Amino acid sequence: MCRKLLLFSILLFISASLKSQNIKGKIIDSETKKPLPFVNIIYGKSNLGTTTNIDGNFSITSTKPIHELYISYLGYHPDTVLLKQGNLLDNIFIKLHPKTFNLEEIVILPGKNPANRIINLVIENRDLNNPEKMSSFSCTLYNKMIFTLGKDTTNIPDSVKQKKSRLERNLENHHLLILETVNEKEFIQPDKYNEKIVASKVSGFSDPIFSLIASQVQSFSFYNEYFEILDKMYVNPISKGSTNRYLFLLEDTLYNEKNDTIFIISYRPRKGKNFDGLKGFLHINTNKYAIQSVVAEALEKDQGIVVGIQQNYEYIENKQWFPKELITNIVFVDALASSGVDDYNMIAKGKSYVSNINLNPQLNKKDFNRVEIKVLEDANKKTDEYWQNHRTQPLLEIEIETYRVIDSISKAEKLEKKLSGLEAFMNGNIPVKCFNLPLNRLMDYNSYEGYRLGLGLMTNNKISKYFSVGGYFGYGFKDKAWKYGGDLILNLHKNTESKIHFSYTNDVIEKSGYSFFETPDFTTTEIYRKYMIENMDLIERYQVSFSFLSLQYLKTKIFYNQSYITATDDYTYGPSLVNSTNEFIFNEIGVQFRYAYNEKFLETLKAKYTLGTDYPIFYANIIKGTNLLDGEFEYIKYEAKVTKTFKTKSLGKTRLAIVGGLIDGEVPISKMYNGHGSYQSFSIEAENSFGTMRMGEFYSDKFLSIFFKHDFGNLLFSSEKFSPKFAIVNNFGIGKLSQNLNHQTTQTIRSFEKGYYECGLLINNILNQSFLGYGFGLFYRYGPYAFTKTADNFSYKLSLTIGL
C-alpha cells in the first residue's frame, strides 16, 4: 500500500509538473538597454503579480496557462506581452519605452490621500521591520562595482550623437575598473558591526584598498530617520512626519500568491519644502507593512555628484524582512574636466547580493570593537575557483575583458606603485622607496615665517613596521631663519595603538597657543587658521611621550618635555624692565585624553581611518610645570574641549565646539592663552576661531570659548544650475587675566572679561569644481569690544569646502 501511495505521489507530481508553466525573462530600457529593477508584472485572471529583481530578471511558475503579461513601471509606457503557447518561455526579452513628461504638484485634499495612510503604517512598523533593530544578525555579501565613462549628450544634436569617439569604442569592450569583494557582516545591539572583507579582487591592483568602496556607499537598511549615500544624509521618506515633507502617490497595486497586497507608491519632496530629500518609489507589502523594494535618487547633484540607490528585501524564515539585493549608481559630473575629456562623466555602478542570512545568532561580543570594517591580510589571494563559487552570476564578457586589459595596463604603467603612493599622499606623505616625505615639510606658510620651504624624511614599513626614524629642516623667507628637528617612533602594539615617541625640535611655535590630542581634519576649515598666525616664539624642545588606547574609546598620551622658549617681540618677564628676560625654561609633565564614544574605524592593510561618531568628542589636558631639572616655573594647566555635530531634518547641520583653559600659577605670556583669533582684512574662513579678533589682541590665564556654526546646506535656496549653501556663525568668548606685575612690554596686554561676541554669514559653494566648493563670508564684531568705526568690525572671508 505504501509503495502504491508513493508511486501515485510521484505520478501526481510529474503530472502537475507537466501542466505547470514556467516563464522566465528580462526587462530592459529600450533606449539605454539597462535592466529595470522592480518592474510590476501582472498575470492570470486573479491579477496575480510579481516584480523583476535588481538585474531586471523575473520568473513565474503557474499551474494554469498564462496567455499574457501586463507590464507597468513608473516613468515608462505600460506594455502587454502576449504569450504563444507551445513556444519556449524561458528567455523572454521585454523592452519598455520611457515616458517624457513633467510631474506637476497634485492637489489632494487632507485625509483623502490613500498613500499617506499606507506610509503612516510603514512608519508605525518601522522598528519591527528594521533589521538593525534585531538583537543580532549575520550575513555574507558579494559586492561588484564597475567604473566607466558616460558621455554627456546634453545640448548635442542627434546627428552628432551617432558618431562615436575612439574612447567610446574602446569602452564598448571594457570598463575603466572593476572590483569585487566578499564581505562577512555581523551585527549586535546596540548598533555594533563587525565586517570583514575576506576576499578582494580589483582589476589592475592587488592592494585591496579599493574594495572598501563597494560596501561603503549606501546604508545597509532603509529604515532609519536619515538615509546615507556617500556620507551625505538625506531625510528618509519613511521617517517621522514625512507625509508633511513628501508627496506620496499610490501608483499601482499588485497581489502575490501568498495573498499579500503590494502597493507601489511614488514619492518626491512637496513644492515649497526645501530639504535634502530623495525621489523614487516604494513597493510596500501588507505583510507587516514592510518595504519590499525601494528606488531612491537624490534630487540634484551635490558637489558635482549625482547618486541613486535601489534595494530589494525578502521575508526570511517567515520572521523578518531583510535586504537581499542592493544597487548603487553614482555619476561624477565634470570630474574629468581637468583631464581634457570634459564631455564625459565618471560613472560608478555597484551591486550587492546578500546570502547566508542568520537571524538572531549567538555572537561573541569580544569580536566587536572600534574597527567596524577590516580588510583581511589574505583577501587579495583568493583563487579563481573561490570567486566562481561566490559570484551570484558569471562575469560578463566586458567584465572579463576589463580584468585582462586593465591588468596589462597596470603592469606596463606600474599603477600598483602609483596607487601606493596615492594612499601615502592621502595620509600626508610622498613615498620615495623606503622613506616617506611629509608634505607639510616641503612647503608651508604662515604670517610670521612667510613661505617656508624644507624637507623631511621618515622611514616607512619597507625598513620596519616596528619603528620609524627621521628628521626635517626648513627655512622661512620672512623671518629668515632655519628650523630643524628629529623623531624616533617605536610601534609597540598595533591593537592598542601603543607608541613611544622621542622628538627634538628647534623651531617656532604660536605664542600662547593651545592644542589637544587630535589629528588635523582636512575636511573642515579649522586647519586654515595656521596660515594667519602672526605671533610666534622660538622653541627648542626635547620630548618623550607614550600614547596608547587605555579604554575602548579613550586614547591617552603621557609626556615629559623640557623647552627653551625665546620671545621674538619686545616682551620680557621679570620684576622690572631691567631685571627681566625674554628667554624661559619650562619642564612639563602631562597627560592628554581623547574620548569618542562609539567612534568607528575602517582598517586597511596599511592604515586605519575614522568613520566618526554621532556622540560628542571630549578632549582634556592636565599639564604640570615643575622647577626640577632647571625648570623656572611651577604651575598646573587644565584644558578641555568638546565638539558635537547635530543633524536636524528640516534645518540642516549644527556644529558646536566649547573650549576652556585654566592656569594655576604665574607664567610668562608664552604659556598663557591668546584669544584664538583669525582676522585678516581678507582671509580664508577658519572654523572654531574668532574671525574678527586680531591676532594677539587678547590674552588670558582663564578662558571659555563657544563656537557655533549652523549649515543650512541647500535648504534656503536651490536651483538646477545654482545651489549655494548658506551657513550662520555665532561665537562667544570670555577670559580673565590675573594681575601679574612681571609682564614687561610696550604693548598693552588685555583680556576679554566683558565677553567677546561676533556673528557671521557664509555663502558656500557659489562656485564648485569636482569636490571643491568656493564661497564668500562676512563676519561682524559687536558687544563691549566693538570698534568705534563700524567698518573695522567687519571681516571678509573666502570659504573653501570639500564635498567628498
Image: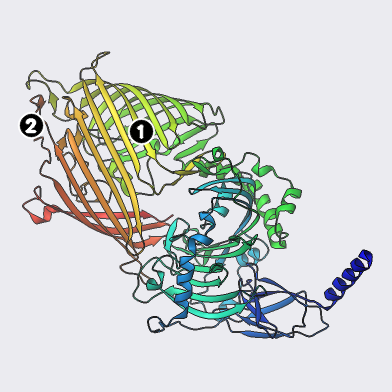
- Identify the secondary structure beneath mark 1: strand
Q: Position of residue 184 (x, y in %)?
A: 62, 48
* Residue located 52% across and 83% down the image: 100
Looking at the rendering, which quadrant does residue 236 occupy? bottom left
Q: Using the image, tell me which numbered label, if any, was put on residue 593.
A: 1
* Residue located 31% across and 58% down the image: 711
Q: Is residue 525 left or right of residue 288?
A: left
**Which amino acid is tagged 2?**
Thr
Q: Is residue 450 visible?
A: no
Given residues 584 and 260, the one toward you in this image is 260
Q: Earlier in the sequence, mark 2 or mark 1?
A: 1
Q: Which residue is mark 2?
A: 746
Q: Position of residue 548 (x, y in %)?
A: 44, 29
* Residue located 43% across and 30% down the image: 550
Q: Residue furthest top?
A: 629
Given residues 282 and 432, the one toward you in this image is 282
Task: Using a 10 Å C-alpha cutoff, classify the residue at mark 2 as few (fewer than 14 neighbours), some (14 to 19) or many (20 or more).
Answer: few
Given residues 19 and 424, the one toward you in this image is 19
Q: Is residue 637 left or right of residue 749?
A: right
**Which amino acid is tagged 1?**
Phe
In the rendered view, would you say 206 is above or below 550?
below
Task: Using a 10 Å C-alpha cutoff, classify the residue at mark 1 as few (fewer than 14 neighbours), some (14 to 19) or many (20 or more).
Answer: many
Q: Position of residue 314 (x, y in %)?
A: 62, 64
Q: Is residue 472 left or right of residue 255?
A: left
